[in-house]
Image (cartoon, helix red, strand yellow):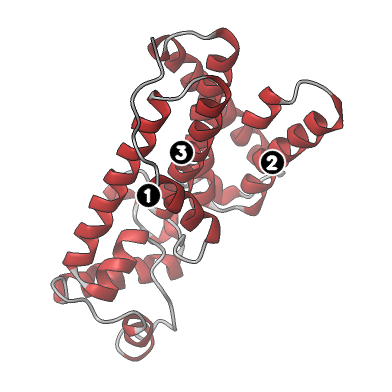
Amino acid sequence: MALVTHWKTGWTKVAYVGLTASMIFLIPLSGSRGGIVGLVFVLGALTILFLRSIAELELLRLLPAGAVAVILFGLVVLAAVHIGIFPQRLTSIPLTAGAFSPEVLGPQRYDVHKAELVTIQRHWLTGVGYEGFVVLTEKMYEIGSFRAHNLITRVWMAAGIGPVLILLATGLSIIRNYTRAIYNLDSIDQMYLSALFIGFGGITVAGMVNIVIDEPLWYVLIAVGSNLIPEESNRS
């Protein structure tokens, strides 16, 4: 969407519009609930970024526009599920602790979720090693060979509470670097860096309910955020 704003005419803009539309359609079509959660975040944030680049309004005045975009997207997804275009499972995204049930998650995913919680309770300090949970699900819990689908629980079970705290601290540091650098930039550079930040946020949000450790783009966006050096503001 950032590139669509920059390239005003020609086939380049058509290509970027097509890629954006494909993302919005294919992620729900895949049935990935983690993907849909990340997409909702990205759509809301990119709507704000897109309108800000055009109207140059204050952020607080654009927040309702982002909320409207998310609501409209949700209504479209529900309608598409109702007529059979998107998978039915998209209507059962667990948003509360009570929603974590076999009916919502599916029997297999629910068993894995329970095994994650039990493993963390028993080995919260040091974890069980990177492949340890795979062995436990097969040998001890007898539910098959699985890895955790949550970024935090995967790190926690692999190495314990210490690396989880490091992960959270690193994430906060990257967010700080991005926001400081974005504030100190102007015009098109600010928009592009904001788009990268939104991409990082979308993949990370999806990672709270899905696997992102094996996603190369996530590491690229982490590297960008880690190497941003705050400079003196260019703003007057």
Disc 2 vs disc 3: Cβ atoms closer than 8 Å? no
The amino acid sitting under disc 1 is Ser
Q: How many marks?
A: 3
Identify which residue is drawn at 21% across, 76% down.
127
Of residues 74 and 135, the one nearer the viewer is 135
Q: Earlier in the sequence, mark 2 or mark 3?
A: 2
Tags 3 and 1 in contact by the CB under 8 Å rule? no
Give the label, 2 or 3, closer to the camera: 3
Using the image, determine if residue 11 lies above or below residue 89: above
Determine the image quadrant of residue 164: bottom left
Q: Residue at x 27, y 72 (%)?
A: 157
Question: Depth check: 18 or 177 in front?
Answer: 177
Is residue 100 in view from this perspective?
Answer: yes
Q: Quadrant of residue 236?
A: top left
Q: Earlier in the sequence, mark 3 or mark 1?
A: 3
Q: Which residue is mark 3?
A: 197
Give the residue drawn at x 58%, y 29%: 73
Q: Residues within 10 Å of mark 2 (few under 14, many from 20)?
A: few
Q: Is residue 31 left or right of residue 101?
A: right
Kind of element beneath mark 2: helix
Q: Looking at the picture, which amino acid does disc 3 mark?
A: Phe
In the displayed image of the protein, which residue is found farthest to the bottom? Answer: 139
Residue 229 lies, in percent from the top left, at 36, 40
Q: CA distance from mark 2 to mark 3?
A: 22 Å
In the image, taking residue 156 as reference, residue 187 lies left or right, namely: right
| Residue 233, quarter of picture | top left
Give the vertical position of 71 relative to 221 (above or below). Answer: above
Residues packed near mark 1 inside 10 Å, few (<14), some (14 to 19) or many (20 plus) = some
Tell me, for residue 25, which label it has, or none: 2
Q: Which residue is mark 1?
A: 226
Looking at this view, is 81 or 3 the one in front?
A: 3
